[in-house]
Image (cartoon, rainbow, N blue to C red):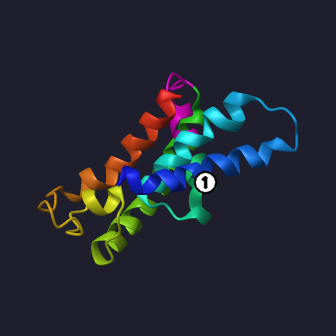
Amino acid sequence: MVWKLEEVFHGIVKQTIDSIADKGECDFLVSIAVPLPSLFIAEMLGIHKKDRERFHQWSDHTIAEDGNFDDPEIVAKAGAAFSQYTRYCTKIIQDRRANPRDDLVSISAGSPFVPSRPPLKIDGSEVQYSPSVKVRTGHTDT
């Protein structure tokens, strides 16, 4: 899967750099280091391109809760984001079970599109939370 994504990742990096090139300068963290892992993870999960900004916002709100449990506004935003994200992932998981693709959600959902190995047997809640873990990992690493 990774080799297939190499060209896609090059395109994401090019598009990201092109979007800031005309400005002549950027905050590297804000413009490149933070969004790229989220975009890569979204691509590997098979998140629709039209939903990537929303996906990134959900991730930001969820991550913002870490260390801010005493701030009710941040906790509320994180809870709402996680709820929306979970509903979104549930729909994607249902779609991938019916229409498997070459992405991590299809693999986790047990879609048998990889003939060289048997499908994974993961229950619904594990599949549902797996994308969330990948998103948090991508954010934490940056």
Point out residue 9 in the picture as x, y percentages from the top left corner.
Answer: 53, 50
Horizontal and vertical percent position of residue 124: 24, 59
* Quadrant in the picture for residue 120: bottom left
Q: Nearer the viewer, residue 37 or 125?
A: 37
Q: Is residue 124 left or right of residue 68?
A: left
Which of 31 and 4 lies nearest the eye of the viewer? 4
Q: Is residue 100 magenta?
A: no
Q: Which residues are magenta?
A: 58-70
Q: Residue at x 69, y 46 (%)?
A: 16
Residue that badge 1 annotates: 11
Query: Is residue 55 visible in the rendered structure shown here?
Result: yes
Image position of 106 with respect to 35: above or below = below
Residue 84: give x, y in percent of width and height.
Answer: 50, 56
Going 23% across and 68% down the picture, which residue do you hit?
111
- At x 61%, y 35%, the residue is 34
Q: Position of residue 105 (x, y in %)?
A: 34, 59
